Amino acid sequence: MYIPALSIMLNQSQLQQQANLSVMKMAMNTAQQNSVNFTKMLEQSVQPHLGSQIDLKL
């Protein structure tokens, strides 16, 4: 086989793998940040004073 062509194909393959890994890391970071934001949103929505007292009419 033609060695320069093999070298080019190998380099292109490595570049594609690096790009795929970079995109995957970005997606994972985005998902992690979204989960942190969602958790913070849930924590802020909790109202601990609600439901702690019952009003009774006799």
Image (cartoon, rainbow, N blue to C red):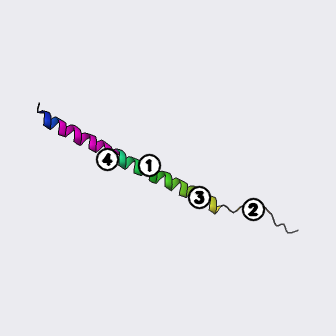
Mark 1 or mark 2, which is nearer to you? 1
Q: Position of residue 57 (x, y in %)?
A: 85, 69
Q: Circle 3 — which element? A: helix
Q: Nearer the viewer, residue 46 or 54?
A: 46
**Local crowd size for mark 2, using a 10 Å CA cut-off: few (<14), some (14–19), many (≥20):** few
Q: Name the residue furthest top.
A: 1
Are the residues tagged 1 and 4 within 8 Å (C-beta)?
no
| Numbered label tally | 4
Mark 1 is on which residue type? Met
Asked if 34 appears above or below 1 in the picture, the reply is below
Q: Seen in the image, is 27 located left or right of residue 54? A: left
- State the quadrant of the C terminus: bottom right
Residue for badge 4 = 19
Q: Name the residue furthest left.
A: 2
Mark 3 or mark 4, which is nearer to you? 4
Q: Counting residues from the N terminus, which is met first, the one under dot 1 or under dot 4?
A: 4
Residue 17 lies in what quarter of the image? top left
Query: Magenta region: which residues?
Result: 7-20
Residue for badge 1 = 28
Q: Position of residue 42 (x, y in %)?
A: 60, 58
Main SS of residues in magenta: helix
Q: Counting residues from the N terminus, which is met first, the one under dot 2 or under dot 4?
A: 4
Residue occupying the point 63% across, 58% down: 43
Q: Circle 2 — which element? A: loop
Residue for badge 2 = 51
Q: Position of residue 35 (x, y in %)?
A: 52, 53
Are the residues tagged 1 and 3 within 8 Å (C-beta)?
no
| Residue 52 among those drawn in magenta | no
The alpha-carbon separation of the residues under discs 2 and 3 comes to 22 Å
The alpha-carbon separation of the residues under discs 1 and 2 comes to 38 Å
